[in-house]
Image (cartoon, helix red, strand yellow):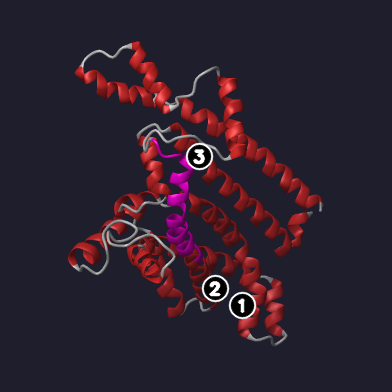
């Protein structure tokens, strides 16, 4: 219980620090959204102070001293009211996030889980069969695939499978003739449009899971308890899974927690290349247009998801390895 309370206290403290930084950082950026709008208007002549005031009021630009803005910001978090987006005015930030989040979870979340499970199992196999082709093939293949940046792999798949082969759509989350609903045709259309972005993430991330698990497990295989288990005549797969892999998976589990927490942030480069309307693409629009309300909501959501994932991994760590509770 004391281990849980310590982790909970650290989580609350870190969350408050993250929330505060999320409030401060956008305000350190030069200029405001109103300045961008006024710059366009000034091309036709000088802009009056009354016009500036009207634009700031319409966009809901924060006013008052910094402390008043901070208190208002905390109240917005508690009530989940993040205001109106400057970029997509007059749409609310909450509605924009709720529209983009399901696509990101389906794309990045599912692929991350698949890559973790597949990469971990291949890493266990490679370590157990080290020195054979079952070790060489996944290790070299994973290293080669992960060497390419996300955007380069995305562009290659987009060109060959999209423009040349016409096998998959090149942009969007669903076809122009589809209507968002919980129907079978719409779900299949969404999965079809997510195929290339998902394949990009899978190819570039699978190698890291394989190499991480393989290297850690090779060190574990040299421990005395593994040798003792083998000497007692236990089956090979029992020694590999229940003894070696259980201890070797802990570092990979930590990385998985970070990756799973980052799922909410989407894959900025992949979503930009494919024009996929997820959180990453929305974040790019928010930063480009200095959209404070949208930026703060997205940063906060990403930060909280990473902190929650780390907190859950810490608790799970204590269950799998009781030594960490000391």
Please give the residue where the numbered disc 1 appears in the rendered image: 240
Decide which of tag 3 and tag 2 comes sooner along the chain.
Answer: 2
Asked whether disc 2 touches disc 1, contact meaning CB atoms under 8 Å apart, the reply is yes
Q: Position of residue 98 (x, y in %)?
A: 47, 49
Decide which of tag 2 and tag 1 comes sooner along the chain.
Answer: 2
What residue do we see at 31% from left, 25% from top? 37
Q: Is residue 252 left or right of residue 109?
A: right
Q: Is residue 226 left or right of residue 202?
A: right
Is 244 colored magenta in this rendering?
A: no
- Whether 58 is drawn above or below 287: the answer is above
What residue do we see at 29% from left, 61% from top? 175
Q: Do we see residue 271 in this rendering? A: yes
Q: How crowded is the residue under tag 3: few (<14 C-alpha within 10 Å), some, or many (20+)? A: many
Along the line of sight, the residue nearer the viewer: 154 or 23:
23
Q: How crowded is the residue under tag 2: few (<14 C-alpha within 10 Å), some, or many (20+)? A: many
Please give the residue where the numbered disc 2 appears in the rendered image: 124
Quadrant in which residue 104 is drawn:
bottom left
Q: Which mark is residue 297?
A: 3
- Whether 179 is drawn above or below 241: the answer is above
Q: How crowded is the residue under tag 1: few (<14 C-alpha within 10 Å), some, or many (20+)? A: many
Quadrant in which residue 142 is drawn:
bottom left
Mark-to-mark CA distance, 1 and 3 = 44 Å
SS class of the residue under badge 3?
Answer: helix
Decide which of tag 1 and tag 3 comes sooner along the chain.
Answer: 1
């Amino acid at each position: 219980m004391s281990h849980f309370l310590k982790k909970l206290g650290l989580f609350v403290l870190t969350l408050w620090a993250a929330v505060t930084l999320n409030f401060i950082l956008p305000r350190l950026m030069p200029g405001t959204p109103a300045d961008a709008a006024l710059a366009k208007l000034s091309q036709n002549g000088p802009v009056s102070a009354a016009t500036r005031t009207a634009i700031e009021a319409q966009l809901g630009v924060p006013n008052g001293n910094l402390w008043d803005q901070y208190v208002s910001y905390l109240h917005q978090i508690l009530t989940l009211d993040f205001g109106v987006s400057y970029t997509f005015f007059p749409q609310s930030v909450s509605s924009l996030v709720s529209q983009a989040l399901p696509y990101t979870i389906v794309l990045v979340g599912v692929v991350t889980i698949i890559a973790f499970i597949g990469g971990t199992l291949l890493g266990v196999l490679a370590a157990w069969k080290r020195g054979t082709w079952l070790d060489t093939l996944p290790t070299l293949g994973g290293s080669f695939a992960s060497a390419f940046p996300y955007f380069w792999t995305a562009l290659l798949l987009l060109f060959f499978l999209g423009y040349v082969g016409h096998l998959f759509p090149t942009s969007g989350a669903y076809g122009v003739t589809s209507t968002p609903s919980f129907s079978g045709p719409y779900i299949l259309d969404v999965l079809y449009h997510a195929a290339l972005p998902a394949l990009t993430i899978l190819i570039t991330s699978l190698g890291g899971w394989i190499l991480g698990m393989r290297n850690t497990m090779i060190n574990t295989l040299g421990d005395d308890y593994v040798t003792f288990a083998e000497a007692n005549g236990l089956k090979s797969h029992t020694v590999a899974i229940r003894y070696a892999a259980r201890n070797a998976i802990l570092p990979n589990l930590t990385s998985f927690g970070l990756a799973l927490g980052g799922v909410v942030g989407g894959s900025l480069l992949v979503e930009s290349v494919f024009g996929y309307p997820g959180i990453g693409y929305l974040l790019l629009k928010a930063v480009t247009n200095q959209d404070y309300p949208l930026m703060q909501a997205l940063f906060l959501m990403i930060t909280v998801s990473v902190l929650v994932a780390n907190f859950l991994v810490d608790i799970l760590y204590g269950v799998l390895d009781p030594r960490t509770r000391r």
